[in-house]
Image (cartoon, grey):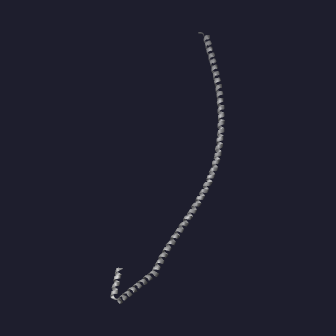
Amino acid sequence: MSESTLLTIFTGIVAISFLVQCIVWIILARTVQRLATRVEEIRESLSKTAETISEKVEGLLSTIKTSAENLKTLQENLTATSEVIHSRVVSVDRFLSDATDSARLQIIRIQDTVDMACRRTEYAVDLLYRGVLRPVSEASAIMNGLRAGLAVLLRRANPPAVRARREDEEMFI
């Protein structure tokens, strides 16, 4: 084979490779163009989706903001209410403490009054016994003694038959 034939074959191979390369470049260009179109479609779809999500997020944020403001108001109300309840509980606690102290003092006074009344009653009973009952009892004993003495004196004056009958009666009783 000659040089010119080799050169022609080589030139043909180069021309075919350029042709194949051009076809590959054209295919690549069309593929890239289709990909670019597809990417653009996806970008538009994503953009619409992002806008929708953004609107929903903004709505959600406004709802959260409103809820947060309501929660803040609720928290302030709860704080105020708990302070009022706390002050009332402290007031009731003071009142109960004062009432308990007062009741204790009254109970102590009542106990002292009852003790004093018991002592005075015992003293009055003792005075009654010493001032009235003992002298009455002694007078009664003296009277019984006088009666017995008179009875003995009078029995001697009675005849023995009357005395025996009385003794029988006394034994019967």
Tell me the residue at 66%/34% (across/down).
48
- Would you place residue 158 above or below residue 104 in this image? below
Q: Please tell me which residue is depicted at 66% across the width and 41% down the height of the picture.
A: 59
Q: Is residue 91 above or below residue 155?
A: above
To which quarter of the image does residue 160 belong? bottom left
Horizontal and vertical percent position of residue 34? 65, 25
Q: Position of residue 79 (x, y in %)?
A: 61, 53
Answer with left or right where residue 87 lies relative to residue 123.
Answer: right
| Quarter that holds the N terminus | top right
Pick the quarter of the image with the C terminus.
bottom left
Residue drawn where x is 40% and y is 86% of the image:
147
Q: Residue at x 64, y 40 (%)?
A: 57
Q: Which percent across, then down, holds residue 75?
A: 62, 50
The percent coordinates of residue 124 (x first, y second) are 48, 78
Q: From the viewer's side, name the closer residue of 142 and 51.
A: 142
Looking at the picture, tell me which residue is in the foreground, 92 or 116: 116
